[in-house]
């Protein structure tokens, strides 16, 4: 579902991402961990066509990232770190617009909007503007925006940062259920060990723009170590500090 | 592309029309000039000379600040969400710019209606031709405004643009024709691209259609439109895989 070769991004003299090889298989939930500034978001912005790689190549959701970015866009959903819920507009109209921008007819877009709102337990909130919602509700609206066109691959950039524990657990349940129902592949970045541990099938750890470790949470933790120990060994930094816990 | 532009345009217009106060508010300054300065001006000049200037002032203020909408969309992440859809960048720009055109049409019509009530007597053909010119000019300025909004720091956009508009309005000769200006100011005002369409507009409002001033105004407007739309599309296209 994702296969990159030597994906690199430099900004002037600064190498943000230094030749990463990433794979994700269909139906997998892959977690992308790393300290702040390690290159997580830059990598994700390259994979979602928002940033042009300096070098390297990638096939994302069956389309070549450089040769056919529009093909990639049609088949992926992306939830950015800060979210994308307009603060002042009623959200139903915004969702229907989003569907139509993927080529859906008005009726079809409205029907999918209704179904997704119900699926994500948002029915009744759709006439409100974004500013009138809780953090957890906004996050679920973000996911609704990203799923209207039924993508095969969903990118989540720090999906639960700033949410209370209950909303985080609720969001994990939704992500797991979506994978189970639709065979959705999920690629997410996170600071949180519990999130990586509880939600992801496989983890990639990035530091200074390079992938420094890869494996299932269980394999990485072998020998009775915690993920934080592993992370500290590899990056010299504690993930707990990074996450501010 | 055309369908996406249309979908975005319709959505934008619906959103804009919901904020009726905003549309009227954008036209308040020129309306104030019309009512509180117009009677004074017409002791030495004509409504047909003043009103084109106020239309250009309206266009500059209203369309020059059009980029403000995209500042909000950028900070709320909406723009990035749209950039991950398969919609072309040109459609993202055109959908917005055409929506701005609707706003400008309503505002200009308001201003003209008020001007007719006060004593403007311009021929219909001239007003219609002027309308077309102003629309092309306004849409181009809006495209340029988006380019600025996506380029500079988002906190600077409003102060920078609202300040930049003032000398452009003054140098185009909105309030008094530049023919009354001292030589250096007249020379300086030739640098403002808005001087030429404004002078063309005055000719049109006086019922003169085929002369050099009108031709020059149209030519400058066309060049300005080509440059602005190119810059706007470039900026919307920037940094993609």
Image (cartoon, rainbow, N blue to C red):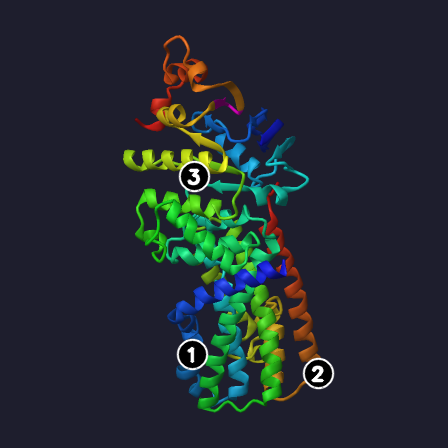
Residue A81 is marked as: 3
Give yes or no for contact between labels 2 and 1 (Cβ–Cβ under 8 Å). Answer: no
In the rendered view, tell whether residue A171 sits above or below residue B136: above
Are the residues under marks 1 and 3 on the same chain?
no
Determine which of the numbered discs, if any, sits on residue B31 in the image: 1
Viewer-nearest residue: B156 or A173? A173
What number is the disc on residue A237? none
Q: Main secondary structure of the magenta part?
A: strand
Real-space CA distance between mark 1 and mark 3, rounded to the nearest whole angstrom: 44 Å
In this view, the residue in front, A236 or B134, is A236
Q: Secondary structure at mark 2?
A: loop
Point out the residue furthest to the front here: A181
Q: Which residues are magenta?
A: A203-209
The numbered mark at residue B211 is: 2
Query: How far is the residue under mark 2 from the one under mark 3?
Result: 57 Å
Q: Nearer the viewer, residue B217 or B43?
A: B217
Q: Residue at x 45, y 14 (%)?
A: A219
């Amino acid at each position: 579902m994702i296969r990159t070769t030597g994906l690199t991004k430099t900004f002037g003299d600064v190498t943000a991402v230094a030749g990463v090889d990433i794979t994700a298989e269909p139906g997998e939930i892959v977690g992308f961990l790393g300290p702040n500034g390690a290159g997580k978001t830059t990598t994700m912005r390259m994979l979602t066509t928002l940033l042009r790689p300096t070098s390297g190549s990638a096939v994302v959701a069956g389309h070549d990232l450089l040769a056919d970015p529009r093909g990639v866009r049609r088949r992926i959903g992306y939830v950015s770190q800060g979210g994308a819920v307009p603060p002042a507009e009623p959200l139903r109209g915004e969702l229907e617009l989003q569907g139509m921008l993927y080529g859906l007819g008005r009726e079809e877009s409205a029907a999918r909007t209704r179904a997704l709102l119900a699926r994500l337990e948002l029915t009744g909130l759709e006439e409100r503007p974004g500013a009138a919602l809780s953090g957890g509700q906004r996050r679920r609206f973000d996911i609704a925006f990203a799923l209207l066109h039924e993508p095969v691959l969903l990118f989540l950039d720090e999906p639960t940062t700033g949410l209370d524990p209950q909303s985080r657990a609720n969001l994990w349940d939704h992500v797991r259920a979506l994978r189970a129902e639709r065979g959705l592949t999920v690629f997410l970045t996170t600071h949180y060990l519990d999130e990586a541990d509880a939600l992801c099938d496989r983890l990639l750890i990035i530091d200074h723009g390079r992938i420094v470790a890869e494996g299932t949470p269980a394999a990485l933790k072998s020998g009775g170590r915690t993920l934080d120990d592993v992370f500290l060994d590899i990056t010299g930094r504690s993930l707990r500090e990074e996450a501010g816990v | 592309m055309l369908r996406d532009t249309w979908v975005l345009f319709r959505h934008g217009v619906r959103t804009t029309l919901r904020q009726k106060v905003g549309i009227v508010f954008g036209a308040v300054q020129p309306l104030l000039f019309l009512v509180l300065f117009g009677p004074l001006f017409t002791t030495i000049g004509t409504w047909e000379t003043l009103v084109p200037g106020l239309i250009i002032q309206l266009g500059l203020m209203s369309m020059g600040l059009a980029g403000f909408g995209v500042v909000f969309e950028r900070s709320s992440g909406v723009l990035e969400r749209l950039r991950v859809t398969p919609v072309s960048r040109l459609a993202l720009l055109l959908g917005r710019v055409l929506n701005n055109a609707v706003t400008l049409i309503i505002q200009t019509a308001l201003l003209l209606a008020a001007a007719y009530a006060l004593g403007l007597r311009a021929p219909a053909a001239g007003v219609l031709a002027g309308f077309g010119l102003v629309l092309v000019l306004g849409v181009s300025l809006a495209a340029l405004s988006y380019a600025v909004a996506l380029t500079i720091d988002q906190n600077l956009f409003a102060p920078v643009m609202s300040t930049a508009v003032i000398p452009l309005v003054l140098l185009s000769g909105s309030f008094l024709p530049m023919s009354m200006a001292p030589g250096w100011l007249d020379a300086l005002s030739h640098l403002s691209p808005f001087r030429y369409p404004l002078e063309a507009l005055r000719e049109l409002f006086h019922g003169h259609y085929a002369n050099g001033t009108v031709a020059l105004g149209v030519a400058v407007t066309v060049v300005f439109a080509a440059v602005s739309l190119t810059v706007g599309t470039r900026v919307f296209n920037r940094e993609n895989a």
